[in-house]
């Protein structure tokens, strides 16, 4: 992609088109595009004065706020890259990532200042610590707002193209987290790939409630800015607060993971709220049970629905199931279970274990290439070479194309269960379980078995006021699936499902809970 493309250009375009229009709404605070751009340029001056080098990293540990948005653009404006960290990680995990990326500046939001000593030590000592919040900065830190007010604007340092823009760590649920290097060109390509399907333009009002350390939320920061729309920020996802904010600020666009939609459906406020402003509700990042999708579409009949599929390494979107495919007259096609078709500038394939292309209908690993593919993994040329072998990003997802070019994602390679020599795809079993009227959420994974190698194990939570039994749920699955695919063991969970930082159900946590119970002699 042309070296001239840059994320700074998106901000300049927004100022040109809507300088006096509202750029950011954060609670009671609002900023025009001119005011936001000025704060970004001044904060870039702060970062530069504190030693941010070209290609250097600004670590951000914060809930969503206007400060977070400013840090994203200011780090890039000053010639560096933003590294947003997952605030739900343990301290040791955060310190490992700080040590790995060696930041020039660390920014901590409200509630995270008590970690400053440990993070500073992990960074190797003399790294400026900035406080992104209201009021006086804690000891040893300096206030972002105070520094912005006292610093002259810095000209954009001109980073673009394949220059690093965002260093984003993957979740690391099965191994140490990897730093994914994403460039200006990567995110510009993502905007080009999604802009039209999402119906973006200067009149959009986009709600950011997902964490900015997750690529789906981070990418929307840039694409909404490219559109010169309005950013609405909530610190984190809370169903009732999201419903109220959509109504209050007349949000037109928002993106969710399935657990969030389940929480909204279970919130009594949804039934009486005026969400008529919502034009496009997009979802992704985790498998969407078809019964849940139909339920939320029925609850929000005025909204268009859109699914996107991708991953951090793809910055992130490579397929879209568009709004037309979600219309009721198309439900009988079975394509609600698909991830849609490849976006404009992404090439996808399905390959076997020897990287040989497979025809439509045959399942294999999904691979992708195009201008949206990451630069590589930070300081891991070995992992980069393995993931990008043959010029294709190997996603680790299993799927197939149908004859019309729709991609069906059926499992993660690491989540596929091999029971008695048969492949069992967890998503297929989860879809069957989700079709039971009492089931709210479920997760399926392999449990070690002395005879079969692995046995299918399921965990389910129930909808409020509903009741069923494990035997009934297993019988329900057996009426839909081949018996070898059905859960051999199933637990109905009273507590909420454990979630990752991006609000996905954490199978790793469920597996560890099961392992601990078995080690203690329980079921």
Image (cartoon, rainbow, N blue to C red):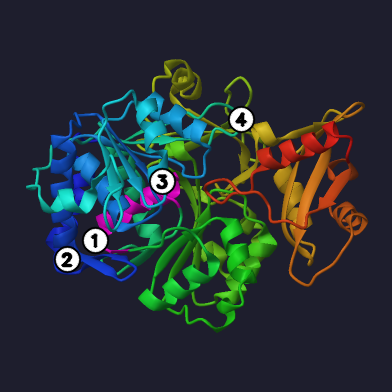
Question: Do the residues under discs 1 and 2 have CB atoms within 8 angstroms?
Answer: yes
Q: Residues within 10 Å of mark 4 (few under 14, many from 20)?
A: few
Q: Residues within 10 Å of mark 3 (few under 14, many from 20)?
A: some
Q: Is residue 439 above or below residue 243?
A: above
- Relative to the observer, which residue lies in front, 360 or 272? 272
Magenta segment: 211-231
User: Mark 3 — residue?
Assistant: 112
Q: Is residue 218 above or below residue 380?
A: below
Taking the image as shown, residue 19 lies to the left or right of residue 340, namely left
**Label whose residue precedes the other's in the sequence (3 or 1):** 3
Quadrant of the rendered structure where residue 17 is?
bottom left
User: Mark 1 — residue?
Assistant: 228
- Relative to the observer, which residue lies in front, 335 or 281? 281
Question: Do the residues under discs 1 and 4 have CB atoms within 8 angstroms?
Answer: no
Residue 18's disc is: 2
Residue 174's disc is: 4
**Label whose residue precedes the other's in the sequence (1 or 4):** 4
Find residue 113 and report its horizontal and vertical position in percent: 37, 44
**Label whose residue precedes the other's in the sequence (4 or 2):** 2
Does residue 94 appear in this view? yes
Residue at horizontal 73 percent and vertical 56 percent from the top: 495
C-alpha gap between disc 3 and disc 4: 26 Å
Query: Which element is circle 4 on?
Result: loop
Q: Is residue 264 above or below residue 95?
A: below
Residue 210 forms part of the magenta stretch: no
Residue at horizontal 13 percent and vertical 37 percent from the top: 157
Query: Which element is circle 3 on?
Result: loop
C-alpha gap between disc 3 and disc 1: 31 Å
């Amino acid at each position: 992609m042309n070296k001239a493309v840059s994320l700074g250009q998106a901000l300049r375009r927004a100022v040109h088109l809507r300088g006096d229009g509202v750029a950011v709404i954060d609670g009671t605070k609002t900023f025009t595009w001119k005011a936001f751009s000025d704060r970004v340029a001044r904060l870039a001056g702060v970062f530069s004065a504190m030693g941010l080098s070209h290609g250097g990293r600004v670590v951000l540990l914060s809930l969503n706020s206007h400060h977070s948005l400013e840090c994203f653009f200011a780090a890039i404006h000053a010639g560096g890259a933003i590294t947003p960290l997952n605030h739900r990680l343990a301290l040791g995990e955060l310190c490992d990532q700080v040590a790995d990326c060696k930041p020039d500046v660390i920014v901590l939001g409200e509630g995270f200042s008590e970690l400053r000593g440990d993070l500073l030590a992990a960074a190797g000592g003399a790294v400026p610590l900035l406080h992104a919040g209201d009021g006086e900065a804690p000891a040893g830190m300096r206030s972002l707002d105070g520094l912005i007010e006292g610093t002259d604007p810095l000209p954009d340092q001109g980073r673009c193209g394949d220059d690093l823009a965002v260093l984003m760590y993957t979740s690391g649920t099965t191994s140490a987290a990897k730093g994914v290097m994403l460039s200006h060109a990567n995110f510009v390509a993502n905007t080009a790939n999604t802009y039209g399907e999402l119906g973006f333009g200067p009149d959009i009002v986009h709600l950011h409630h997902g964490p900015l350390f997750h690529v789906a939320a981070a990418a929307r920061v840039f694409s909404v800015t490219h559109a010169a729309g309005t950013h609405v920020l909530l610190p984190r996802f809370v169903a009732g607060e999201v419903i109220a904010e959509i109504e209050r600020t007349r949000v037109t666009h928002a993106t969710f993971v399935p657990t969030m939609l389940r929480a909204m459906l279970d919130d009594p406020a949804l039934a009486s709220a005026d969400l008529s402003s919502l034009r496009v509700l997009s979802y992704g990042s985790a498998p969407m049970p078809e019964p849940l999708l139909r339920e939320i579409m029925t609850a929000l009949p005025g909204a268009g629905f859109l699914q996107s599929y991708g991953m951090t390494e793809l910055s992130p979107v490579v397929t879209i199931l568009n709004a037309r495919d979600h219309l009721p007259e198309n439900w009988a096609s079975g394509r609600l279970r698909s991830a849609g078709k490849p976006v404009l500038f992404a090439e996808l394939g399905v390959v076997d274990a020897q990287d040989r292309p497979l025809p439509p209908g045959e399942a294999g690993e999904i691979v992708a290439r195009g201008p949206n593919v990451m630069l590589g993994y930070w300081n891991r040329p070995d992992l980069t070479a393995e993931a990008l072998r043959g010029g294709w990003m190997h996603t680790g997802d299993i799927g197939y194309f149908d004859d019309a070019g729709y991609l069906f994602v059926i499992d993660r390679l690491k989540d596929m269960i091999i029971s008695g020599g048969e492949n069992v795809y967890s998503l297929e079993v989860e879809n069957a379980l989700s079709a039971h009227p009492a089931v709210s959420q479920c997760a399926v994974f392999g449990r070690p078995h002395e005879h079969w190698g692995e046995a299918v194990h399921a965990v389910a939570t129930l909808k409020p006021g509903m009741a069923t039994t494990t035997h009934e749920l297993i019988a329900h699955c057996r009426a839909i699936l081949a018996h070898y695919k059905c859960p051999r063991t199933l637990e109905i969970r009273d507590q909420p499902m454990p979630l990752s930082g991006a609000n996905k159900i954490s199978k790793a946590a469920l597996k560890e809970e099961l392992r601990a119970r078995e080690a203690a002699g329980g079921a």
